[in-house]
Image: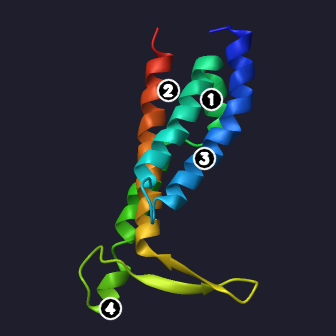
Amino acid sequence: MTSIILRTATRYMFPPLLVFSIYILLRGHHYPGGGFVGGLFAGSAFALYTLAFDVADARRLIRIDPRDITAAGLAAALLSGIPPLFTDHAFLTGTWWEVPLFSGATMDIGTPLIFDIGVYLVVFGVLLTLVFVLGEEE
C-alpha cells in the first residue's frame, strides 16, 4: 500500500500503541487487561506498520524472529511456575518478592507478572507470525 496518509498516521500512532500495550500489560495485574490484551495491542501496532509499509520494513523494525519471541514467552510462562515449588506450594501458585527501589520504598514483584509477560510475548509473537506470513503471500 502506498498511501501517504496511512504512512504518516502510522508513524505517529505506532509508538503510543506500543506504550499503551505495556501499560495494559502492567495494569492487568490488578484491573482488566494483562498479557493477552497487551500482546494484542502490540501485535496490532506491528500489523498497522506492516500494512502501511511492508513486511520487510516491519521485520527490520522488530529485528527478532517472531518464533523466538513466542518461545521466550513460553519459557517465561513456564519458569513463572517454578519458584512456588521451592516453598512447598503447587505449580503456578502466586509468589511475591519485595524489591527495594532507589527512593527507599519497595515494590512487589510476583510470579503472576512474569506469567503475564510470558503470555504477552506469546500473543505478540504468534500475531506477528500470522501478519508476516499473510503479508508475504502474493
Q: Which residue is mark 2?
A: 132
Q: Which residue is mark 4?
A: 87
Residue 116's quadrant in the figure? bottom left
Q: Are marks 1 and 2 in contact (CB under 8 Å)?
A: yes
Say which residue appears at 58% left-offset and 54% top-offset.
Answer: 23
**Three-letter residue code for mark 4:** Thr
- Observer-side mark, 3 or 4, equals 3
What is the crowding at mark 3: few (fewer than 14 residues within 10 Å), some, or many (at least 20)? some
Query: Residue 87: x percent and y percent?
Result: 32, 91
Q: CA distance from mark 3 to mark 4?
A: 35 Å
Q: CA distance from mark 4 to mark 1?
A: 44 Å
Q: Which residue is mark 1?
A: 58
Q: Are marks 3 and 2 in contact (CB under 8 Å)?
A: no
1 or 2: tag closer to the N-terminus: 1
3 or 2: tag closer to the N-terminus: 3
Q: Is residue 2 left or right of residue 86?
A: right
Say which residue appears at 53% left-offset and 80% top-offset.
Answer: 108
- Observer-side mark, 3 or 1, equals 3
Q: Is residue 116 left or right of residue 51?
A: left
- Work out whether 9 lies above or below 21: above
**Three-letter residue code for mark 1:** Ala
3 or 1: tag closer to the N-terminus: 3
